[in-house]
Amino acid sequence: MSWKCNYEQLSYLVYSLQCSEFKKF
């Protein structure tokens, strides 16, 4: 599930952290 990871590359750094949490779920 990397739909949010590649949602906005501009905020990739910010999303990257969120993606890590999302991956946990």
Image (spheres, grey):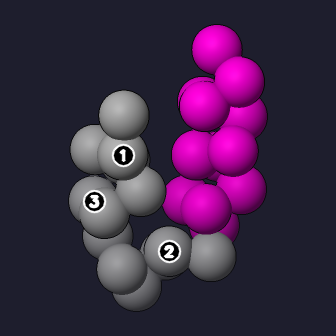
The amino acid pointed to by label 2 is Tyr
Give the numbered dot on residue 2: 1
Does 23 sit left or right of 1 as displayed?
A: right
Residues marked 3 and 1 touching at CB (< 8 Å):
no
| C-alpha separation, residue under disc 2 versus residue under disc 3 | 8 Å
Which-is-in-front pick, marks 2 and 1? 1
Give the Cα distance between marks 2 and 1: 12 Å
Q: Residue at x 27, y 59 (%)?
A: 7
Quadrant for the C terminus, please: top right
Image coordinates for residue 2, horizontal then vertical, percent? 36, 46
Q: Neighbour class for label 2 at 10 Å: few (<14), some, many (≥20)?
A: some
Q: Could you say which is closer to the camera, residue 11 or residue 6? A: 6
Which residue in the protein does label 3 denote? 7
User: Considering only order in the chain, which callout, 1 or 2, is on the residue closer to the N terminus?
Assistant: 1
Kind of residue at disc 1: Ser
The residue labelled by disc 2 is 12
Tag 1: Cα neighbours inside 10 Å, few (<14), some, or many (≥20)?
few
Q: Position of residue 5 (x, y in %)?
A: 41, 56
Q: Amino acid at mark 3?
A: Tyr
Q: Residue at coordinates 72% horizontally, 34% vertically from top-left?
A: 21
Q: CA distance from mark 3 to mark 1?
A: 8 Å
Q: Position of residue 22 (x, y in %)?
A: 60, 30
**Where residue 1 appears, x then y in whole percent?**
36, 34
Q: Quadrant of residue 13?
A: bottom right
**Depth order, front residue of 11/2:** 2
Label 2, secondary structure: give it. Answer: helix
Q: Which residues are magenta?
A: 14-25
